[in-house]
Amino acid sequence: MLRGMARQQRLSTIMDRGFAALDDGDYDAAEAALMQAQRIDRQHPDVLVLDGELNLIAEEFGTAEESFRKAMAAAPDALPPRLGLGRTLLSQLFEAQDAGDERAAREAADEILQVLAVVPRDSEDHPESLLTRLAALAGVGGKHEAGPQLLVIADETIEVLPELALDAASPVAVFDLPRVLGWLERAAAQQELRADALHMRGMVLADNDQREQMIAAWSEVWRLDGADDAPPPEVTATDEEFEEMAQAALQELPPELRERLRRAAILVDDRPPLEMVAEGVDPRSLGLFTGTPTTEEQGGQPALTHIYLFKQNLERMCRDLDELAEQVQITVWHETAHFFGLDEDGVSDLGLA
């Protein structure tokens, strides 16, 4: 008996280490912990959940689904297997949408709404459950028998947790823009959320072709982000460090592309100037391409072409200099792809969105 208790204690310690690594984004360490745990008890619900989470990250959706379903069967009242299964089914819903398979998307949405309906509203997992269900509802255009009640729950939850509106806005705006604007207005009433809520307001208005209101919201975001009391970035690079990061990103490009980029001036600014925002540029853009893509040139004098990098915006989304260097590289390549004629969909297909 004591041996069995020691075995379970060892498993618990390994699982704590594995989930902590998962939360930190150290997937190699999480995988190593999983392999240790599987040698003790492959069918333990926590082991199955960790296996499911790692397969979900690896986009092995079928394997992830199998692990989460086994965990649910072993521990029907546990919430982590349900949350994991909900996220897995949501990924499959998106895949079905991309493939034009409306039936499969509907079936995935049905099960998500059923599986997560049992998550108590007073649980710390309720916000994640709610967001997953709202995304599933958006996946079927808001047309589901569970929709009205779910939106009432969302209204009541955001009344208490207005910050949740920032994550709920984008999917729900697809089918209920007025409700989302109300959520964001409530969030914007909180001083610490105001800039983020107004920025999201601009995003959903942009998606709905309401340009004038979008620019008004983003102009206020520009003012708030530049105010003396705006939160500072977690990481700040010197101008020299930032220049080195940008040049390193360029050096990673093939020589023939670097040669063609010679006529494109790379400019660094903290943020887009207000004049750009007034023309519809997102004030929190990380970079921007202006000019004529090479695919549209028709001889004669080449158009003036600029690739902008917005240093302060990049710094604000990063936690350390390594992450900043990685994001600078992605942004340089993203804007370079526009220079060579790719639209946002083409850039996204390259993993540079």
Image: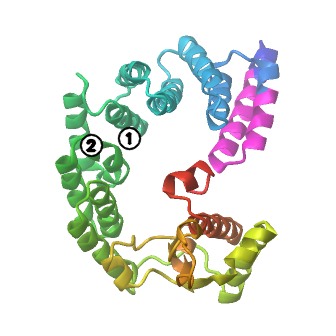
Instruction: Classify 10 Å Cα crowding around label 1: few (below 14), some (14-19), many (20 and above).
Output: many
Which of the image's four quarters has the C terminus?
bottom right
The quarter of the displayed image where residue 213 is located: bottom left
Which is more toward the observer, 123 or 169?
169
* Label disc, if present, on residue 24 of the rendered structure: none
Q: Which residue shows up at 25% across the image and 64% down it?
A: 188
Q: Amino acid at mark 2?
A: Thr
Q: Is residue 94 part of the magenta span, yes or no? A: no
The quarter of the displayed image where residue 228 is located: bottom left
* Local secondary structure at mark 1: helix
Residue 268 position, x and y percent, is 57, 84
The vertical placement of 131 against 208, above or below, is above
The vertical placement of 351 against 1, above or below, is below
* Label disc, if present, on residue 127 of the rendered structure: 1
Residue 344 position, x and y percent, is 50, 57
Query: What span is in magenta?
Result: 8-36
Q: Which residue shows up at 60% across the image and 27% down it?
A: 61
Q: Amino acid at mark 1?
A: Pro
Cα separation between marks 1 and 2? 8 Å
* Label disc, if present, on residue 157 of the rendered structure: 2
- The earlier-in-sequence mark between 1 and 2 is 1
